[in-house]
């Protein structure tokens, strides 16, 4: 549903209307350390202008360049609906180059020579608006579900239980699989997939969650963590008790929301 921000167009259209569009789920933010500042970008204005001129000569048409130049020189971020972050822009600033290496597909395939830090500072889960209709798996279901109330509350409650026990909850870094929550304790990495469930979708959600957390466990091991414990955390206990047997067979801890106060003890005795 769209209505122009331009006053003249709004007066002509009078009311919003349905138009074709697309939905892109975003993850993050992932803070840069150190951050890239606007001052640093402006100090490289000549390089940016040269980049823009080269692009114009090689690629006629719309470039979606992320900066305009006030007074012909001062770089200012543009405000259209969509911009492109160019490879040449990343190459111009070393801090972005480091991040690009971290998130490249090959970054984690170094044979486990070094173990990277786990995740980044925990990002509080929030309830967000979602489309009422969507084709399944057109986007990562983990990103879609994080806007649901039951999921957000269960995830935040788990993070708070960890904090109270002196354990730091962690959110994913861009190089890592798309887990909900992870933490380190007693030489092990714990990775949790939270699932909001209802009587109607319990089977579907738990099958999805189990597949996700098994994949997260595998990917974290490939990133150099030899001991990874997987947890599936539904917002209530499953009606079908065979889910407990299945998770046990696969080495996954099934822990409902009303049981998450047990997590600190599990963290201290991961083999229990």
Image (tube, helix red, strand yellow):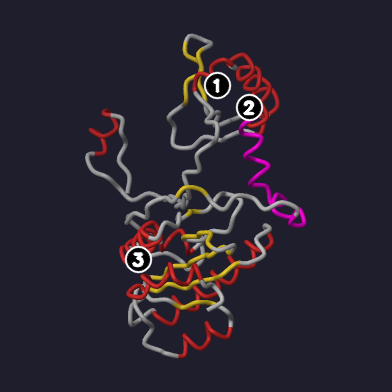
Please state the horizontal and vertical placement of residue 70, each as a whole percent of the image. Answer: 47, 13
Which residue corresponds to mark 3? Answer: 154
> Observer-nearest residue: 246 or 212?
246
Residue depicted at 42% across the width and 56% down the height:
166
Give neighbour class at mark 2: few <14, some 14-19, many 20+ (Cα, 10 Å).
Answer: some
| Gap between marks 1 and 3 measured at Cα | 41 Å
Residue 59 picture quarter: top right
SS for dot 2: loop
Q: Is residue 247 magenta?
A: no
In magenta stretch: residue 108: yes
What residue is disc 2 on? Answer: 93
Looking at marks 1 and 3 on the same chain, the residue that comes earlier in the sequence is marked by: 1
- Taking the spot 31% from the left edge, 63% from the top edge, the residue there is 149
**Cβ atoms under marks 2 and 1 closer than 8 Å:** yes
Q: Foreground mark, 3 or 2?
A: 3
Magenta stretch bounds: 93-112
- 251 and 94: which is toward the camera: 251
- State left or right for residue 88 relative to residue 64: right
The span from disc 2 to disc 1 (Cα, nearest Å) is: 8 Å
Badge 1 is on which residue?
A: 41
Question: Looking at the picture, how far across and down is residue 96, in whole percent?
Answer: 61, 34
- Is label 1 in a helix, a strand or a loop? helix
Label 3 sits on a secondary structure element that is: helix
């Amino acid at each position: 549903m769209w209505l122009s921000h331009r006053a003249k167009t709004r007066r002509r259209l009078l009311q919003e209307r349905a138009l074709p569009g697309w939905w892109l789920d975003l993850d993050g933010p992932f803070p840069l350390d150190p951050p890239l500042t606007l001052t640093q970008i402006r100090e490289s204005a000549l390089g940016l202008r040269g980049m823009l001129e080269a692009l114009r000569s090689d690629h006629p048409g719309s470039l979606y360049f992320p900066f305009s130049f006030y007074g012909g020189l001062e770089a200012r971020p543009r405000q259209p609906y969509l911009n492109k972050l160019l490879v040449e822009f990343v190459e111009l600033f070393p801090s972005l180059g480091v991040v690009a290496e971290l998130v490249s597909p090959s970054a984690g395939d170094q044979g486990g020579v070094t173990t990277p830090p786990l995740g980044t500072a925990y990002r509080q889960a929030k309830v967000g608006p979602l489309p009422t209709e969507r084709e399944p798996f057109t986007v990562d279901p983990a990103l879609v579900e994080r806007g649901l109330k039951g999921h957000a509350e269960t995830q935040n409650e788990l993070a708070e239980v960890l904090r109270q026990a002196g354990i730091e909850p962690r959110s994913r870094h861009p190089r890592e699989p798309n887990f909900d929550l992870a933490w380190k304790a007693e030489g092990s990495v714990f990775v949790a997939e939270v699932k909001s469930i209802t009587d109607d979708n319990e089977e579907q959600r738990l099958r999805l969650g189990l597949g996700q957390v098994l994949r997260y466990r595998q990917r974290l091991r490939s990133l150099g963590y030899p001991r990874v414990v997987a947890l599936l955390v539904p917002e209530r206990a499953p009606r079908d008790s065979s889910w407990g047997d299945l998770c046990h067979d696969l080495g996954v801890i099934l822990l409902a929301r009303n049981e998450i106060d047990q997590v600190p003890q599990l963290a201290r005795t991961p083999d229990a």
